[in-house]
């Protein structure tokens, strides 16, 4: 991990998940086949890409039971407690419909309605993510979504990891399908003989999943195009180098294209963290992935002043931001762009990943400049409610008609004029 002075004008541009032209064409072909052939295409692509032949790809009640029995009771309790924390946090986000009545009889308002069906993609591949089940399903349940469908890639044994199935079981999600990749996104978007179509798809995945979500957007809604994981740590000389390095590596082990950045004004801390990253890499089971990440996308940015450090963090707009300083709350108000903000030495990023309660599905690739973590609002629709009284239309009708004619829309104006008899 290189130490770079911010004054060297290093590029802070993120890694955008655009994919190659060949990958885009492959995804388009897969989506077309699933739309035309349904389950047949899904099963064929699962065998081709995942190397496993599955006849029935909906998870059976027996598979849920086997997953529950395979895991020890303590782990079950940990998952249940985490789910409770996450639910409590998201319940505070639930908005209410509202209506405002005027003296003239006009009623204006906003009606909140949950979407009817949501599809959740839980990534597989190099790791299993029961936490992704919680973070995608719970806000949908709190919003009031009636139908939740989950997809996740099968392992070489044709099974879903026990932890993922247990998480789904804890939340009462029964519609779980052993399918991943672009074919899973297509199945959720358009439906098959087995998989019901949904209104919105959430959850991260590989480049093929990201490209598939781009393709189906418009026919269904999506949460975001998630890029590789990233963390920025804003630290002063009160931070412990060993802890900072460990937190940087917590994201580097996700993906070879993950980004881990330390922003500091302390030369001593920068050098200590650089050495700690090197030393701790030797102890990680996923060292090859983490090492590639820190070599290609990791950096230590050494700033001259705290003002420059804060500006740098806002330029990065990181998915995760840790503030490890003498008084972290002092800097909170100056942070404009970050998906999740962790304050103080005890708020290590994994606290948010698994247990605290806030959602870990966060904006990446600098999109924290304009977007937010996955939340209950993502599963809700807001309808405007307008009820004009005769008194209100009499008072404002001529103004409305004149406004319409100003825009050259005579039929709009006549729709108001035709009601004049009502207020004469």
Image: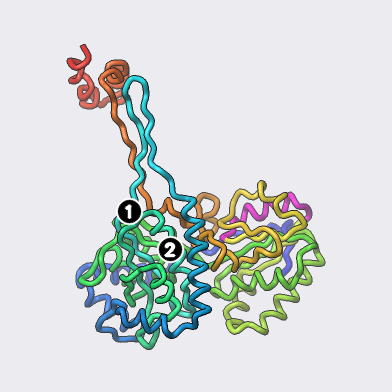
Residue 96, horizontal then vertical, whole percent: 41, 43
Sequence order check: which comes first, mark 1 or mark 2?
1
Q: Residues within 10 Å of mark 1 (few under 14, many from 20)?
A: some
Judging by the rendered image, the residue that carries numbered circle 1 is 115
Task: Give residue 44's quadrant in the image.
Answer: bottom left
Left or right: 267, with 371 as reference point: right
Q: Position of residue 112 (x, y in %)?
A: 36, 45
- Using residue 198 as the reference point, say whether residue 378 is left or right of it: right
Q: Is residue 198 magenta?
A: no
Q: Measuring from the top left, give residue 82's x and y in whole percent.
A: 52, 67
* Quadrant of the rendering where the N terminus is positioned: bottom right
Instruction: Determine whether 406 is above or below 210 in the image.
Output: above
Relative height, residue 114 to residue 60 (above, below): above
| Element under disc 1 | loop
Q: Which mark is residue 136?
A: 2
206 vs 359: above or below: below
Taking the magenta stretch, the answer to whether it contains residue 305 is: yes
Please indicate whether residue 78 sits to the left or right of residue 211 in the image: right
- The residue under the point 37% across, 63% down is 213
Specify start and end residues of the magenta stretch as a single range: 304-319
Cα distance between the residues tagged 1 and 2: 14 Å
Q: Secondary structure at mark 2?
A: helix
- Which quadrant of the figure contains the C terminus? top left
């Amino acid at each position: 991990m290189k130490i770079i002075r911010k004054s060297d004008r290093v590029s802070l541009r993120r890694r955008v998940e655009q994919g190659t032209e060949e990958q885009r064409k492959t995804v388009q072909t897969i989506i077309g086949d699933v739309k035309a052939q349904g389950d047949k295409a899904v099963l064929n692509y699962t065998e081709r890409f995942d190397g496993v032949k599955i006849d029935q790809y909906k998870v059976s009640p027996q598979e849920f039971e086997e997953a529950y029995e395979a895991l020890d009771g303590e782990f079950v309790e940990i998952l249940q407690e985490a789910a409770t924390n996450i639910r409590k946090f998201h319940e505070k986000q639930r908005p209410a419909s509202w209506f405002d009545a005027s003296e003239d009889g006009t009623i204006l308002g906003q009606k909140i309605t949950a979407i009817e069906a949501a599809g959740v993609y839980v990534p597989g591949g190099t790791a299993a993510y029961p936490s992704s089940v919680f973070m995608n399903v719970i806000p949908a349940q709190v919003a009031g979504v009636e139908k939740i469908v989950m997809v996740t890639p099968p392992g070489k044994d044709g099974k879903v990891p026990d932890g993922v199935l247990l998480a789904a079981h804890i939340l009462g999600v029964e519609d779980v399908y052993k399918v991943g990749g672009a074919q899973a996104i297509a199945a959720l978007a358009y439906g098959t003989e087995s998989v019901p179509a949904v209104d919105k798809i959430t959850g991260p995945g590989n480049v093929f999943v990201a490209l598939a979500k781009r393709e189906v957007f418009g026919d269904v809604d999506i949460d975001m195009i998630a890029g590789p994981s990233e963390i920025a740590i804003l630290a002063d000389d009160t931070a412990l180098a060993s802890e900072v390095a460990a937190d940087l590596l917590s994201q580097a082990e996700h993906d070879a294209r993950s980004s881990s950045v330390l922003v500091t004004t302390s030369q001593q801390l920068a050098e200590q963290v650089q050495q700690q990253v090197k030393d701790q890499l030797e102890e990680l089971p996923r060292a090859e992935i983490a090492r590639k990440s820190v070599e290609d996308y990791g950096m230590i940015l050494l700033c001259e002043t705290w003002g420059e450090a804060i500006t740098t963090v806002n330029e990065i707009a990181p998915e995760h931001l840790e503030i490890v300083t003498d008084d972290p709350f002092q800097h909170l108000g100056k942070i404009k762009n970050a998906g999740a903000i962790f304050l103080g030495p005890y708020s290590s990023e994994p606290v948010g990943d698994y247990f605290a309660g806030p959602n870990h599905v966060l904006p990446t690739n600098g999109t924290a400049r304009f977007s937010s973590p996955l939340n209950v609002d993502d599963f809700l629709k807001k309808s405007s409610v307008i009820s004009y009284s005769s008194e209100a239309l009499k008072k404002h009708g001529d103004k409305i008609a004149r406004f319409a004619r100003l825009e050259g829309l005579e039929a709009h104006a006549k729709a108001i004029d035709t009601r004049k008899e009502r207020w004469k």
